[in-house]
Amino acid sequence: MVLSDSDDEKWIYREHTAAKHEVYQKYLTPWTYKLSSWNDKLRVVDCFAGRGSYVRAEDCSGVELEEISTPTDLPGSPQIILDRLTKHSDKFEKAESVFIEANKQNHQDLYENISETTGIADNISKKCVHGEFQNEILDIVSTDGDDCPTLFFIDPFGFKSLDYEVITEIGATDQFEMIITFMSRDINRFLENEDHSDAMETTFGTPNYIDEVGDFDAENWEPLVEYYTNRIEGVGPELTFEYLITEPDTRQTVYYLVFGTNHPNGLKTMRDVMNICGTGNFGYAPKIVDHDREQSGLAAFTSGMEATKEFLVDSFSEYRIEFRKMVEMCYKMRKYEDDVESDYRKAIQDLEKEGKVEVIRRASKTGGSGVTKGDLIDFRNEEELEDI
Ligand SMILES: C[S@@+](CC[C@H](N)C(=O)[O-])C[C@H]1O[C@@H](n2cnc3c(N)ncnc32)[C@H](O)[C@@H]1O
């Protein structure tokens, strides 16, 4: 029997819900910081907002809110958004939050939960929209490229509303970023089921998805999500990054969070956030050893650093490049390596000591050993320089 979206059974707070909320909560802070530094107005759209509460938690606890009070112990994504925006409300002039919910009962519950939430900063507006994301969103935002920075949470229960045309249209828009819940488990289950072929075609934006998706199995579902990210990268957000969420007690993938952005700095920021969430190494996957945080940490301190240095020297031997730009390029080239900005900084400091690069300290203290945004890293050797 298919449960209605307002059935209490669908509103149990599980470990994978907590894992998703951790990423939402942790990303909102740097996103707000960075974008408010050159924009007066920001917007967050929760496209599948839910009811703003869960009925009970199983083996985990609800998200902690710091700034606002809401009538439930188990709040949903809308309150996470309001809490984080409130926390950083001194950084922007105004922020808009929009919550879209299609189910009438859920929308009613959400409206009541949000109306009874207190402590929200005065410069944050909030609106609950009753309707379907795919029909409403293009009336809410403009995809002409002149709209304010907007972060979209796209979090359906299944996949039939992941409308490829709509997602790629908003995803291709400058200053727009999105986090999509890509329901690998359900998609895998129904991939070849004819009753679901229309929904699959809507999701992947092509009738050829079965032939194109490639091989994947229960142990390795990456090809499925990679097919999806390749499909959207072609026309939607230029850059994507995936975060794996499994069941807590098995290796079973539940979904991926797919992040999409058009800006390398957005990718870098989300990558840094996803690396410190869950069980580390870009996932919440307690039973998959490769996704264990300790292992990734160890790699960074042993052979990992040598590999990083080698990669830098090989890739940038002909460059003199600003440090942050170099890090952004590394993130694009080595999407799923463990290294974060501090690892690249350490590698540059080592290479400087070894005489393999020159650091031109335009931003950090001259005479010191710091390396920061604005500093130039010169990988070219003397002979190459003489040839210029
Ligand atoms: C996974 S739940 C959202 C949970 C919420 N984001 C959170 O983290 O607390 C998905 C919600 O989307 C709603 N929904 C289903 N189809 C929709 C559509 N086409 N547009 C907007 N909402 C939809 C469902 O009623 C349900 O409340």
Image: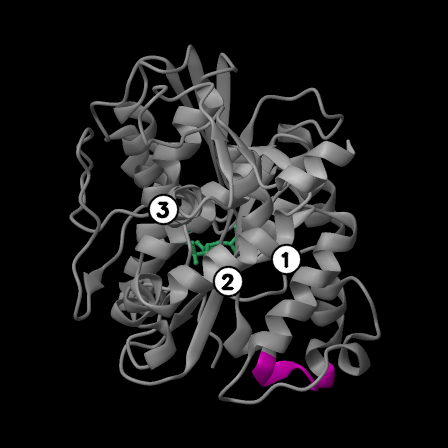
Residue 108 screen position, x and y as percent: 38, 42
Q: Give the range drawn in magenta.
A: 188-194
Foreground mark, 1 or 3?
A: 3
CA gap, disc 1 to disc 2? 25 Å
Which residue bears the numbered disc 3? 346
The amino acid at mark 1 is Leu
| Residue lying at 70% horizontally and 86% vertically, measured from the top left | 192
Q: Which of marks 1 and 3 is nearer the N terminus?
A: 1
Badge 3 amino acid: Lys
Q: Classify 234 as above or below 226.
A: above
Badge 3 density bin: few <14, some 14–19, many ≥20, Cα 10 Å = some
Q: Residues within 10 Å of mark 1 (few under 14, many from 20)?
A: many
- Residue nearest the observer in this picture, 348 or 131: 348
What amino acid is found at the position of numbered circle 2 in the picture? Answer: Tyr
In the image, what residue occupies the spot 36% across and 16% down?
91
Distance Cα–Cα, label 2 vs label 3:
19 Å
| Residue nearer the viewer, 130 or 380 | 380
- Dot 2 alpha-carbon crowd within 10 angstroms: few under 14, some 14 to 19, many 20 or more: some
253 falls in the magenta region:
no
Residue 29 lies, in percent from the top left, at 34, 33
Q: How far apart are marks 1 and 3 (CA)?
A: 41 Å
Ligand 1 lies under 8 Å from the Cβ of mark 2: no
Q: Name the residue under label 1.
A: 162
The mark closer to the camera, 2 or 3, is 3
**377 or 15: nearer the eye?**
377
Nearer the camera: disc 1 or disc 2: 2
In the rendered structure, find residue 336 and report the number of the disc placed on it.
2
Name which of mark 2 and mark 3 comes first in the sequence. 2
Residue 236 on image: x %, y %: 72, 47
